Image (tube, helix red, strand yellow):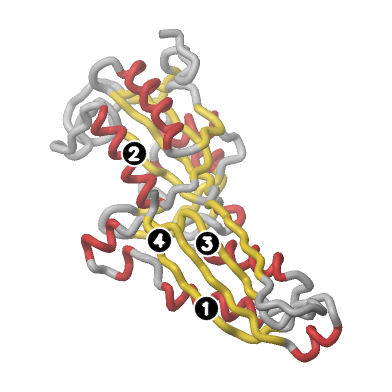
Amino acid sequence: MSDQIVLKGISAVGHHGVLDFEKRDGQTFVVDVTMQVDLAPAGASDDLADTVNYAEVAGDVVALVQGEPLDLIEALAARIADRVLARPLVEAVEVVVHKPQAPVGHPFTDVQVRVVRERQAPVVVALGSNLGESVETLHDATVALFALLDIVEVSSLVETDPVGGPDQPPYLNAVVTGTTHLAPSSLLAGLHDIERAHGRTREVHWGPRTLDLDLVQYGDPVFDTDVVMDSATLTLPHPRAHERAFVLVPWLQAEPEAVLRVDGTVRRVADLVSTLDTSGVRPGPDVDLLEGPW
């Protein structure tokens, strides 16, 4: 179970309600926000960048309460939840909106609406292997990804010439697209766990490996919901994905309308592929990574 950050009793005056005087006069609303966040990185680093700035969250809540008048506090709660989930580290959120001065017409102490929302972010994961039983390894890794995301598409296998690094055998590569409720850092940790389970070591830069899992993109650039970050442990989108045919070719096969943010500009993957030398990317074994045969 994820750790939590809880903000209780955020108070602001808003003009939400279906009655004319509610829109005209306004009233006090009180909001509680409970965020599911992996706090292990912050606990280890003591760095604000590794957690959620709850002062900023409180500011967002107040801005929404004081902002556009809505008829229903259900709608207000949903907008607050969406705003909180836009923060990359938040995996799920519970929002409670209290309307203690609601015109109920009978004695009462509080009216509240509670909504729970879980992140569902589109993600792209690139897989590669050139040591051992690569087809079996990539199959096992793809199945293991179900623990981290809801898989939408799995590309065909491609065989690719190694790029950079020492002399080594050709790779088998594939791309998986899906959605996840995990924050980017949690998803990356899960990918590393799968790599280690298959004997991955990081001794030689760009050297041969039993399994490589790269988080290429998190979120959707079309709707400007993709995460752009550059930390010591994770850069998004993947800084070299736009120039790697062994990533883009299978990605395009899995998602023909795929897009990728490159230097701040959203580009069609098909257009990126058209500018690359793809001669080192060939069809791989005709095997469905989810179905077999095995």
**What is the CA distance from the residue labelled 4 to the residue labelled 1?**
16 Å
**What is the CA distance from the residue labelled 2 to the residue labelled 1?**
37 Å
**Residue 282, x across and y down, in percent:** 42, 20
Q: Which residue corresponds to mark 4?
A: 4
Label annotation for residue 86:
3
Proximity of marks 1 and 3: CB atoms separated by less than 8 Å:
no
Q: Amino acid at mark 1?
A: Gly
Proximity of marks 4 and 2: CB atoms separated by less than 8 Å:
no
- Among numbered discs 4 and 2, the one appearing first in the sequence: 4
66 or 258: which is nearer to us?
Answer: 66
Q: Please tell me whether mark 2 or mark 1 is closer to you in this view.
A: 1
Label annotation for residue 9:
1
Q: Residue at 65% across / 86% down in the picture?
A: 13
**Residue 103, x across and y down, in percent:** 79, 80
Q: Residue at 73% across / 87% down in the picture?
A: 26
Q: Amino acid at mark 4?
A: Gln
- Among numbered discs 1 and 3, the one appearing first in the sequence: 1
**What is the CA distance from the residue labelled 4 to the residue labelled 3?**
16 Å
Asked if residue 274 is positioned above or below residue 13 in the image, the reply reads: above
Q: Secondary structure at mark 2?
A: helix
Q: Can residue 88 be seen in this snapshot?
A: no
Disc 1 residue crowd, few under 14, some 14–19, many 20+, Cα 10 Å: some
Q: Please tell me whether mark 1 or mark 3 is closer to you in this view.
A: 1
